[in-house]
Amino acid sequence: MISRRLLLRSTGVAFGAAAIGATAACGQGGGNAAPEDDDAPKDMRFAWWGHEEMNRTTAEAIDLYNSRSENVTITGENASWDDFWDRMATQIAGDNGPDAMQMSNQMIVDYAQRGALLDLEEYMGDVIDTSTWNEDLRSYGVIDGIRAGVPISTDGFTVLADRDRVEELGLSLPEEGWTWDDLAELALAIREGGGDDLYGMSDGSGRYELLEPWVRGRGKRFFNAEDTPVTLGFEKEDLAEFWEWWARMRADGGCVTPDIEAENLSHETSPLVGGRAPLYFTTTSELTGIRALMESSIQALPMPDTAGGDKPANFVRPNLFMSAWAGTPYPTECARFLDFWINDPEAVEVIGNSRGVPPSPEAAVLVEDEPDASGLRTPSEYLALITEIGSPMDYLTPRSGRDVYQLLGRIAEEVRFGQTDIPTAVDSFFDQAASTLA
C-alpha cells in the first residue's frame, strides 16, 4: 500500500512515484470494476471543501440528484481546505478515493500527472455537454492528453474597493482599467485624506494574485509550465522591483503596516472589513461573501496593468473543477453527475454563484444577479469586463506551484518585518522555488 507520506505535497506531504503506479493500475478509464449496471444500486461519494453557503448548496444539489434516480445514492463528504487534502491523500493511498470530487485549479495538474484522476474525454459530448462554452474554458482541464476535470465555476483576480469610503474622501474609482501608477496614486491619496488611522490598501507583496499581473504586464509568466521541470517565467529584477514598489507603499502609508497585515488571515479580519484600508485584493468568487460582511458599497476593479506594458494583466480562470477518481467503479455516473451540475437548470439555480460564475453561458444567465442601479458590478459583469480588457489565461497552476505561492508569502513577510533585505530575499526565493519545482 502507498504510504500517506508519499501522496500529496499540498498538506506538507507529497505523491510519490509509487502512487502513480498504484493508481494507474486501477486504470484511468474507470478502474478494474465490472461494467456499470444502471439497474443495480450505486452507492457513491462526492467530496468538497467550502464555506457555509457552498456546503448548503452542495447538499441541496446532491439531494436533488439522488431524488432523480432510485438506484443512485450519492453521499457528501465535506471538509475544510486543509482537512480536505489531508483526507484525499489518505483515501487515495488506501484505494478508497471518493467517486467524484471538487478539484482546485491549484491542485488539478498535480493530481492528474500522478494518475489519480479519471480521463473524462470519452464522456464529452454524449454525456457532458460543453458545446456552448468559451473555447478556452472547454480546453481547461485537459492535462498531458487526459481530461482530468471539467470547470464548474470561473473567476478572476480583483481589487475590491469600499466605494463609499473612497468617495467620502472626495476621490473616485476608475471606470474600467488602470495602471500600477494609478493604484499607487489612489492609495496615497486615501492615506493623505484619511489621516493616521486609514491606509490606502492591504499589503499584496506576498500574494501571487498581485505578482502574476505584475509580470504579465511585462510580457512574462509566473511559471514556464511547459518546461521540464517547470521553471519561473520571470527574472530576479521583476521580483525585486515588485517588492521595492510595495516597500515604498509601506513607507508612505499607501498600504497597511506589517502588524496590520499579519492579522489579515481571513476576510473577516481583513483591513477592508475592519475599516483600516478601502482597497483589498482577492478573487471574484469571494465578492458576494465579502459584500455580505459590509454595509458599504463594494466595487470590483480589475488588477492594474503596466503602463505601456506588453500584455494585459487580467484574465478569466476556471476557479474550480469537478473530477472523478481513477479507481471509481461508476465512471459513467460520475460523468452524469458532472453534467447535471453544470447544465441541469434546477441544479444550476440551487448551486447559484456560491462557487463563482458558472462556465456555461446559459447557466450564468440563470443565476445572474440583478444589475445594480448604482453601477456596482455583479460577478458576471466583472468577468465580462476583464474578458474585454484582458487576455486568455496562460496555464493552470503546475505541479508544486502552490508551494511556490506559499514560499512567496513567507519570504515577503520576512521582508515586511525587516528580517531580510530585498536582494537577499529575491535570491532566496529563486533558489528555493527552483528546488521546489525540480
Image (cartoon, grey):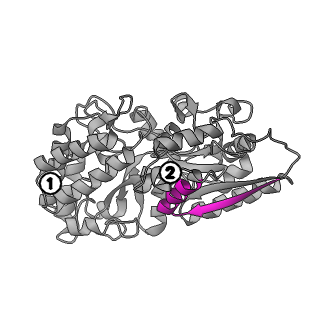
Numbered disc 1: secondary structure: helix
Q: Measuring from the top left, give residue 307's x and y in whole percent.
A: 22, 35
Between residues 87 and 20, which one lies in front from this camera angle? Answer: 20
**Image-based side of 143 in relation to 300, left or right:** right
Between residues 371 and 213, which one lies in front from this camera angle? Answer: 213
Which of pointers 2 and 1 indicates the residue nearer the eye? 1
- Asked whether residue 149 appears in the rendered view, the answer is no
Residue at 50%, 59% (x, y): give it. 86
Residue projecting furthest to the front: 1
Rate crowding at label 1 as few (under 14), some (14 to 19) or many (20 or more) other CA atoms within 10 Å: some
Magenta stretch contains residue 81: yes
Q: Measuring from the top left, give residue 282's x and y in whole percent.
A: 39, 54
Magenta stretch contains residue 104: no
**Image-based side of 192 in relation to 116, left or right:** left
**Image-based side of 430 in relation to 371, left or right:** left
Res. 247 mark: 1
Numbered disc 2: secondary structure: loop
The amino acid beneath tag 2 is: Thr
**Alpha carbon separation for disc pair 2 and 1:** 33 Å
The amino acid beneath tag 1 is: Ala
